[in-house]
Image: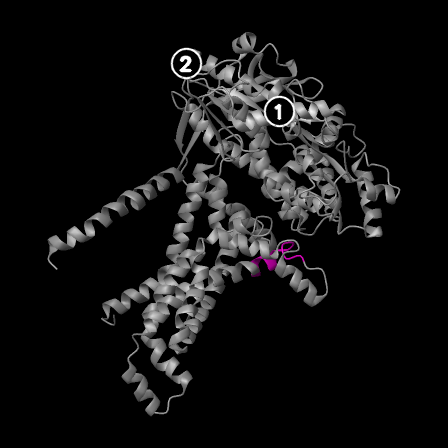
Amino acid sequence: MNKKTFAAFVGPSVVMMILFIAIPLIFVLIQSFQVTQPVTELVEVEKCTPGFTGQICETKIETRQMFDDAGNPLRQTKFVGFDSYNKVLELQRAGAALAEGSIKAFLQIDFWKALRFTLTFTLITLPLVLGVGLLIALAVNNATQRIKGPIIFISLLPFIITPVIGALAIRWLFIGDGILTAAIEWYLARDVALFAQGWTIELMMLFYRVWHVAPFAFVVFYAGLQTVNQDTIESAIIDGASRFERLRYVIIPHMMPLVVFVALIHLMDAYRAFEEIVGFSSQAHIISLQWLTYDFLQADDSGNRSISRASASAMLTMIGIVLLLFPLLRKTWQDYRGGKI
Amino acid sequence: MKFKSIIIAGALSVMSTGAMADCAFTNVNTVKSLSAAFEAWKAVTSAMGECGNVEAELDQEFRTKQPEAFAANPSLYHIGGVANSTAVPLIDAGTIRPLDDLVAKYGQHLKPNQLVVVDGKIMAIAMMVNAQHMMYRNDILADLGIEAPQTYEEVLAAAEKIKAAGVVDYPLGGTYKTGWNLAEEFVNMYMGFDGAFFNADLTPSINNANGVAALEMMKKLTAYMDPEYLVSDSTYVQQQFQQGKIAMANLWASRAAAMDNAEESQVVGKVTMSTAPTVGGGSTPASTLWWDGIVIAANISDSAADNAFRVAMEGLDKEMVQANNDAAVWLVDGYEPTAAAAGAFATAENGAKPYPASKQMSLMHTALGNGIAAYLTGEKSASAALADIEAAYTTAAKEGGLLN
């Protein structure tokens, strides 16, 4: 392919990536080092609001927005360096907790609590997704032609459902006396409340994520299985390799690049865990890094939002993903340099 | 009685056919409104629609849209539907106009009670109020010989008896869902202890004996609730009531009518509405009063504002209230309080205070909503949780330029 054709094919997507990924990212980076505030003054205000029998008047000291001559609200933007990052990370408090040797106090700090959950969630679901995906792929591959279609369709269903809807569906199965909770209660003959403590919610989240993502791994692996060299398999059979040995020494090495690919995508997705938190309303027990960013960014009733801390938190999430992907990316790069791919 | 229901039926049928007969004038200019989407707003906006050329947008996400939409010039909406807390950013940014002239011109029929006045200027017209108050199963309390509880201490004693009798799954219900709901429960309880949220310089002041006492009372109550109380919101508690799973709850007045809705409820006629209890020997009910009402945009011409206000007044008239008497606890003239509103009235008469809405209070509300659960789950002590909430508030207020 000559350079001109290459540019014509790649150009549009590069432009889109610059426009929709690079530029916003630069803005977020800048915002994370700045704070924009309204200019306010303290005033005494008398407010009268309705009661049933009559008005209720109160005098309170409040801040009031100041305006310029044209009637626009005054704002000021200042450079704060790493202040917003520090407010998210709460390093002094974290340091003090660790110096005391109190893991409990350390994990009470929002960011570290969220990081703890996000990392365990990501690392536990990864092998499960790969394993379950491979199992379904092998099962479907060995199924007879007639039922393959329906099995593929049913296995793909969880992946098609919108993540938040899927999380809500699981929530309604288990919350209060939901169908499945009622079933568990009947089986164990005791009262069960799955949303009352952190670990049961965390288990449901793991279950939900594996249920939701395994079909993606399955589709990729199933496609990979179609490309396994049948001659190699046959020679392995002739050499007396058992079914497991064929899987271990022929099929999996062949599919390794696909495993790395699925792992990369899953690590990226799972580190941004969010639907689980919102779907299960688990904020009381469990929060994730992405939810923390959302919480900073979400405006309250009076329109306050913490954009600087949200930006800092988003940048930290990105740094986290890069760190997590680094070993896999380096391996892929080395394979590529060594000409293995 | 029969005559009245005939009138109501008549009014309803007029509304449903969308006839423009009920409007005192024919509106020729487009009037746009943005408000929340619950039943009362549906009633008001459809009554405004009778004047013609009204584009009403009902959206539960109105609060995130309103500040930007009203800051545009010209404003994207003429009329806004707001509550205590959602009026704050509009007043603060100066994007809604004082209504004194318009009230003098078209609003003589408004009760003084409906006027929301900030620094001597009328900024909003309230149409309804809402508050959390006690609802209890009169049959269960009568069977067990329990008097209607007037204080939270009596609520605990009653809950213990109900638990011992084993007549319901859980004696109490509570809107303790982490976030806004849980924070509101604390605000109610803390106000019952006469607590103040801020010092004179707007630094936080909740980490004190009253704050700890409020949290401890909340924890004692949770012992009688469904263990999943940290995910239970108003709708969940309402359903627990309707399905006969709980016997008492401090629930919103706007949910009261649902208890007697025979289509959903198994406890029709068995739920009595009464005042929000006091707590800790105090005299103020542990509840806060909320209002909903309308505001008019600043960034529109005076004639457009004049027109929009007339349309809004048509939406808030006597006919609308008579046709939708049970949709809310209306402040508008013509409202006939029903048994469902008795709890809200009693709470207000006993001196419950308005929700202390301000920019700082919203930050405090968010910090409370995120921080209280750690105490209820036993992760932190009461004063540690309150100290962390104060720290979270201080960080957010400094970042927002609301605290030096």
Q: Amino acid at mark 2?
A: Ser
Q: Report the front residue among A218 and A298.
A: A218
Q: Give the extent of the magenta segment.
A: A193-203
In this view, B137 is above or below A228:
above
* Kind of residue at disc 1: Gly
B359 lies left or right of B355:
left
- Residue B55: where, in percent of width, then height? 45, 26
SS at circle 2: loop
Residue B251 at x, y percent in the picture: 69, 37
Quick one: label 2, few (<14), some, or many (20+) residues within 10 Å? few
- Residue B298, horizontal then vertical, whole percent: 45, 17
Q: Check the residue under mark 1 and report the chain it is in.
A: B
- Per the image, the residue denoted by label 2 is B301
Mark 1 is surrounded, within 10 Å at the Cα level, by few (under 14), some (14 to 19) or many (20 or more) other residues, namely few
Q: Which residue is mark 1?
A: B10
Image depth: mark 1 or mark 2 in front = 1
